Image (cartoon, rainbow, N blue to C red):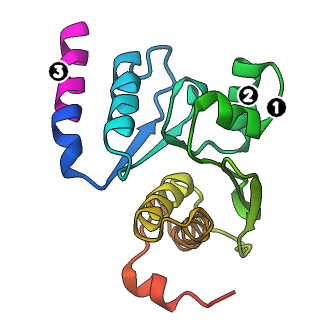
Amino acid sequence: PEDVDRELVLGLESAAPNFDVILVSDQAETSQGGVVTAGMRAALERIASAQPDTVIWVDSRMRAELFRRVIVKPNREEAGAACLRALGTVDYAALRRHLEAPLLVVTHGGDGAESIDGVGSTWVPTRRVEHPVDICGAGDSFSAGAALALKVTRDPLAAVRFGNIVASITIMRKGTGTASPQELLAYPPA
């Protein structure tokens, strides 16, 4: 309802200055999109403009093309569908421009991810994990690791590499797993 939407938007906007990273998980497969409504997307755009040092990282299953001026991370299928809805053709660089996004990261499962910014596109491979236990939550793990690493390093490629490592660890557990600091430190270098 509109009153709940307004309350959530106001809550986000009042809390946003207290955070360095805002992760948006827009995974509701409904036409409305759960709590990530048009009003919430507009609020995220306002926050991105007002707080340029805050990393706003969006993982949207069905509406990636509707976000503006934030980092967007769809997987390959979601990115292709967003391109087709917004542009009529699959073109990740054009989608990034359409989004006015500082960065578009398209994940490709066990093969790695593509980082697209205003300069161009860079492929970031990952170390293939043989026989993963459970890939549920791999994208969420990737997003959490990459967004935090981006805030710390301000280096999109380092962030994507770190996201790949986090996801590589979490897929070796049953259910949605986590990657501990100890596991991340012990992860063998490439």
* Residue holding disc 1: 90
- N-terminal of the two: label 2 or label 1? 2
Residue drawn 50% across the image and 14% down it? 31
Question: In terms of image quadrants, where is residue 49?
Answer: top left
Cβ atoms under marks 2 and 1 closer than 8 Å = yes
Per the rendering, the mark at residue 22 is none
- In the image, taking residue 140 as reference, residue 9 lies left or right, namely left
**Residue 140 percent coordinates (x, y):** 49, 53
Question: Does dot 1 land on a helix, a strand or a loop?
Answer: loop
Give how far across and how far down residue 71 sits, in percent. 52, 44
Tell me if mark 1 has few (under 14), some (14-19) or many (20+) residues whose alpha carbon lies within 10 angstroms of its own. Answer: some
Dot 3 amino acid type:
Glu
Work out how far the residue at label 1 is from the one at label 3, CA to CA, in angstroms.
36 Å
> Seen in the image, is 89 located left or right of residue 78?
right
Q: CA distance from mark 2 to mark 1?
A: 5 Å
Q: Residue at x 55, y 53 (%)?
A: 139
- Numbered disc 3: secondary structure: helix
Residue closest to the eye, 4 or 123: 123
Residue 86 on image: x %, y %: 69, 20
**Residue sitting farthest toward the right:** 89
Amino acid residing under circle 1: Val
Residue 46 in the figure: left or right of residue 179: left
Decide: is 74 above or below 61: below
Residue type marked 2: Cys
Q: Residues within 10 Å of mark 3 (few under 14, many from 20)?
A: few
Q: Main secondary structure of the magenta part?
A: helix
- 112 vs 98: above or below: below
Quadrant (top left/top right/bottom left/bottom right) for the C terminus: bottom right
List the residue tagged with mark 2: 83
Residue matched to label 3: 7
